[in-house]
Image: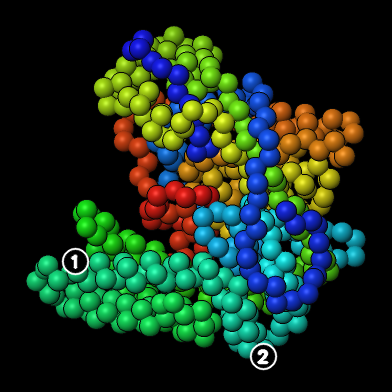
Amino acid sequence: MSTAVKTDKQNELQAQTTQLRRPHAQPTILAVTPTPSTLVSNTQAELYSRLILLSLLSKYKDRPTERDAAGEKQSELIKYRRDFLDRLSYLCDIDKFGSTVTAAALQKVPAFNILWLAANESFHPGVEEFVHRIIHHVKSVTPESRHDVEDTMLEDAVKMGMPRLRFYRDKMVDAAIKCRDDLKQYMPDDQALKLRAWLRKMKKLGMKHLGSKKVVLMIELIKRCEKESDVYMPYLRERDVSFPGNETNGNCYADMKHFVARLRAHVYSVKDVVKASLLTPSLRKIGEIKVEPSSEPRNAILPDRYLNPYRTFTRCLAEEIAPMRISVLLKSVTEREASLDFDSASRKHSQITNTNTFITRVHAEILLADLFSRRNFDFVDDDKYIGCSKPACYCCARYFESHPKTKFVRPATHNKILLGWRCPEPNQDLDIRGRGKKTIEQIERTMNWTVRQHLMEKLEEGGEPIEFHWQSTNGSVRDLSILSGRVIPFRGR
């Protein structure tokens, strides 16, 4: 192992509980200023250092996993309710790159149920109004009015989600152009001709809407994606599998498949919300909507001794008790030095200049998990599920499985290692006896142990890093909790 190792530095790493306000507020994202820097505890620093090293070996711990469907096999009502929480959260996630990622959970109280919501950075009043309108439809929809309610809800959802949908539309047009350019290079067979014709139509339809903020035009586009894409998705999948990608077009077929799926996801989400409303009595008992305040971004300071990946490995190795395994791990690290320069890779990965601080935030689903745990809230039908507009990251998944007090249902997980994640802070108002603080400390210790195990396993296994996959739900099938695909360069959660 090289001794000439410099210290690396790592970085990649408001709305009050409220009820209905006046409608028609515009969905503008609120800017939040990071709080003053704080020195993390030794336990937290060790956790971050292990996450840094694990992410150097692979940005993803595993391929995506689906949510736990154990309870759904006993009762379809459980599945419909979980679908509702996921889809509602998705419709509330109105912008790209993570700031509006939304989570939802149902609390049972004696007379009715409370719908709790939280967002990564900010929950705009316009979105709160939107949710109230959805719940009004949930409580009043009938089989006869189903299609009218779907149309009304879709128009409302598209109006709220225009920033996100415009992004998908522009990306879809770009992918369609690249796919057509690539297809022109080959001898046209029947499949290629059909695909080229469809791509031309989708490009033309998308470009017709470029720059437009008209809801009716966007609805036309996403309904076309829903209606026609199933016919052409198999063609795109076949090309995706066989297409190696290139510097000019990348894997344009995978991109086209993904962004068409994202556009039509709004249609499927609305349909699933309405379907769940008709079939799940507990949703009609929602009598109150509350929003948990988002966490403040925090500039956390990581001590220098935790920024060196070699030192992190040495500390992990010191906890190993099996001599044979120590030998295997040392051999693995020695072999990896030739292909992965930890020193330069860590610096490049961290994008740190002259500071050892990084911005952290409590993710939306963790805010609700912590709230329900601290306050001993009862979940509806004791189904401890928290829906979210995105699958859980690697750290969120570890939090859920490490919680000593509450056995949460495992959510769908994209398994990306996001270093700007943090546990909730103990709340002095709620933790009179220090129970919340002890719970958080126990979670951090358990996560530390788990991440170490995963790190050692990754070193033992060797092999290539897990390939990129989309962090968002697939959108190509009705069940948005089923995941597949690739991931674009990370710009947020």
Left or right of 163 on screen, residue 129: right
- The residue under label 1 is 182
User: Helix, strand, or loop for circle 2?
Assistant: loop
Q: Please give the name of the residue rendered at 37% of the width and 69% of the height, measured from the top-left corner.
A: 172
- The residue under label 2 is 144
Q: Amino acid at mark 2?
A: Glu
Rounded to the nearest whole Å, what is the CA distance between mark 2 and mark 1?
47 Å
In which quarter of the view is residue 135 placed? bottom right
The answer to whether marks 2 and 1 mark residues whose Cβ atoms lie closer than 8 Å is no
Q: In front: mark 2 or mark 1?
A: 1
Q: Using a 10 Å C-alpha cutoff, classify the residue at mark 2 as few (fewer than 14 neighbours), some (14 to 19) or many (20 or more).
A: few
Where residue 204 appears, as percent x and y from the top left, is: 32, 81
- Residue at the outermost left position: 187
User: Helix, strand, or loop for circle 1?
Assistant: helix
**Which image quadrant: the N terminus?**
top left
In the figure, 435 relative to 143: above or below?
above
Q: Please give the name of the residue rendered at 81% of the width and 42% of the height, measured from the top-left corner.
A: 374
